[in-house]
Image: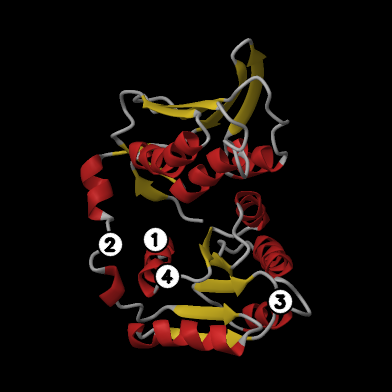
Amino acid sequence: MEQTPFRPVDVLRRLEAAYATQAEAGHGTFEAFGSLGCENGRLGEPEAMMSVVQTILGLAPFAEPDRNVRLKLSAKPMKPIVIEVLTGAETPEIDPSVEALVGRLGGAVATQRSALGRTVRVTLPWSEIALEDASAESPVPEESASLEGMRILIADDSATNRLVLEEMLADTHAALTSVQDGKEAVDCFHAAPFDLLLLDISMPVMDGVTAIREIRAAESARGMPPTAAIAVTANALVNQVADYLVAGFDTHLAKPFRRKDLMHAILTLRK
């Protein structure tokens, strides 16, 4: 995935919004802190950064009552982004997919335990970018944006789902190719280049994860840059999304989704 401009503080706020209500319902607490520098721009993968924290916390971090979680985000100038997640003493072992995902992002993971609980420390060495440059990259009216010149491959075993995607993209002027399984998607990829892959995960013959792995292997063998790829799936639990990113997808769309969600994802990945 091509790195995009973003502000770490925006990811922090999204995580706080996602977990504060859960914590309150479980009579626990979710505290989110950002250091000086989090307002500044970085080049990285904000969705993957979200998935890292979500995978560390697990599917239901506040299922046990009175659970306390503290998230600290540091992005000091000239320093890497550092995420520290402190959970309660009684917490399960960290999901092994965290290390794989962070490794794909070029970072590192360390874990330590203390009387307060387990702390997972993630370091992401993403470069800084001036805020004015980040603003310049921000897309304008996404739903009406043109995708003229883009070649998009759609793979889904449901004819209805393929039709929905085609209708959502009909007025974007993108060149669309639709197939019904991962094997056909791989064959199409070998036959002609594409700018974007929209792959369902659960498909007969070959699933989306296997397809993206074969495509990434072929790109590597040919010395090609990776084609932007979105996992389009109803299977969007935190650990599942982490697996998609590790396999080679750049991001995901959880079914059902709106046209503006699709366009936002595409424009974020478009070079």
Q: Residue 262 bears which disc, if any?
A: 4
Q: Nearer the viewer, mark 3 or mark 2?
A: 3
Please state which amino acid type lies under the numbered disc 2. Pro
Residue position for label 2 = 139
* SS under mark 3: loop
Q: Are marks 2 and 1 in contact (CB under 8 Å)?
A: yes
Q: Nearer the viewer, mark 2 or mark 4?
A: 4
Asked if residue 161 lies left or right of residue 75, the reply is right
Alpha-carbon span between mark 3 and mark 2: 32 Å
Mark 1 residue crowding within 10 angstroms, few (<14) / some (14–19) / many (20+): some
Please state which amino acid type lies under the numbered disc 1. Thr
Q: Quadrant of residue 31?
A: top left
Give whichever of discs 2 and 1 has the lower sequence position: 2
Q: 206 or 66: which is nearer to us? A: 66
Q: Quadrant of residue 52?
A: top right
Q: Residue at coordinates 35% horizontally, 45% vertically from top-left? A: 6
Residue position for label 1 = 268
Please state which amino acid type lies under the numbered disc 3. Met
Mark 4 residue crowding within 10 angstroms, few (<14) / some (14–19) / many (20+): many
* SS under mark 4: helix
Alpha-carbon span between mark 2 and mark 4: 13 Å
Q: Is residue 176 above or below residue 5?
A: below
Residue position for label 3 = 203
Q: Is residue 142 above or below residue 174?
A: above
Residue 232 coordinates in the image, percent (x, y): 56, 69
Please state which amino acid type lies under the numbered disc 4. Leu
Q: Nearer the viewer, mark 1 or mark 3?
A: 3
Q: 182 or 187: which is nearer to us? A: 182
Give whichever of discs 1 and 4 has the lower sequence position: 4
